[in-house]
Amino acid sequence: MNRQHIPFALDDGVAGRAAIGLIVLASDHTIEHEWRAIIPQIPAVGVFATRIMNSPDINAETLAAMEAGLAGCTAMLRPGERIDVVGYACTSGAMVIGPEVVAARVNAVRPGIPVTNPMTAAITALKAMGAKRIALLTPYVDDVNQRMRVYVESQGLEVPVMGSFNLADDNAVARITEASIEDALVELGAHPQVDAAFVACTSLRVAAIVAGAEARLGKPVTSSNHALAWHCLRLAGVQDEVAGLGRLFLTQIA
C-alpha cells in the first residue's frame, strides 16, 4: 500500500500562544533543564533554542567576544516562522556587552521583537516584586562580580550584600550542588539590610529551590534562568500565574 494525499488538519503547533527563541551558551549545562520544568506548565508555549560559541573561562574578554555571534545564532531560530521574543541566556555576557547592544544584534535579524537577557529580566522581576535592596550571589571571579554590582546599582537597586563561589570555569559552576547554592543564598538573603535575593548565572541550578528558599527567608528570590523564563513569557504576552515556582510566577510586570 502506498496511500497518497491522506486527509489532515493543521493546528497552531506547539507555540500557539507564544514562540520563545533562546540563545544558550555552548558551555551551559543548566538552563534547558530548568526551563523543561517551568515552560511545560504553561500550555501552547514553544521554546526554540540555539547555542552560541563561548569560552567556559568566564572573564570580561571572553564574555565580550560573544557579541560577534549573536546575529548568526538569531538566524537559526525557526527561520521563516514566528518568534515572539528572544532571550540571550548569559547574565554576565549581557552585562559586559550591554543589553542595548544585544538587542540591536538580535533585532538586525528579527526586527521589532522584544529581546531580553537574565540581567534585564532579574532587575525587572525584582522591581516587580517590590525589592529595593538585594543580596547578590554569583559564581564569578571578583572582577565580574564588582562589575555586576555596579551595573545592578546603576539600574536602581541597592546591593548591600553579595557573595561568590569565585569559580572561573563554567563547567565546574554547573556542578555546584543545589544544597550549596541554597545554603549560600539563605545566608546572604537573611541579612537584615536586604529585602530580596538574586542568584546570577544561567549555569547555577536554582529554579527548583526558589520556593523553599523563599519560605526559609520570607523574602522574594529569583535567579537568572527563573527570571528569564518569567520575563520571556510576559514579553510574549503570556500572563499566566503558576503556583509552586515562587512569588515571581504569581507577579505581573510592574
Image (tube, rainbow, N blue to C red):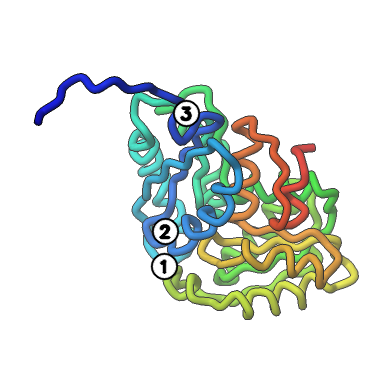
Question: Residue 157: which disc?
Answer: none
Q: Tell me which amino acid carries mark 3.
A: Asn
**Residue type of the residue flagged with mark 1:** Asp
Tell whether label 2 touches label 1 (CB within 8 Å): yes
Q: Nearer the viewer, residue 179 or 193?
A: 179
- The mark that comes first in sequence, 3 or 2, is 2
Q: Residues within 10 Å of mark 1 (few under 14, many from 20)?
A: some
Q: Camera-side residue: 23 or 169?
A: 23
Amino acid identity at mark 2: Thr
Name which residue lies at 56% across and 47% down.
39
Asked if 93 appears above or below 143 in the picture, the reply is: above
Of marks 3 and 1, which one's residue comes earlier in the chain?
A: 1
For the residue pair 170 and 98, the one nearer the viewer reads as 170
Front tag of 3 and 1: 3
Residue drawn at point x = 38 percent, y = 36 percent:
77
Give the class, few, some or many, for how many residues have Cα within 10 Å of label 3's Cα (few <14, many ≥20).
some
Return the residue at label 2. 62
Q: Alpha-carbon distance for marks 1 and 2?
A: 7 Å
**Residue 154 in view in this figure:** no
Residue at the disc numbered 3: 107
- Quarter holding the C terminus is top right
Label 2: which secondary element: helix
Q: Secondary structure at mark 3?
A: helix
* Residue depicted at 37% across the width and 45% down the height: 50
Can the viewer see residue 212 in this picture? yes
**Residue 46: percent from left, percent from top:** 48, 39
Left or right relative to 61: residue 98: right
The part of the image, by quadrant, that contains residue 136 is: bottom right
Q: CA distance from mark 3 to mark 1?
A: 28 Å
Which structural element holds mark 1? loop
Which residue is depicted at the point 72% across and 48% down? 249
Which residue is under mark 1?
57
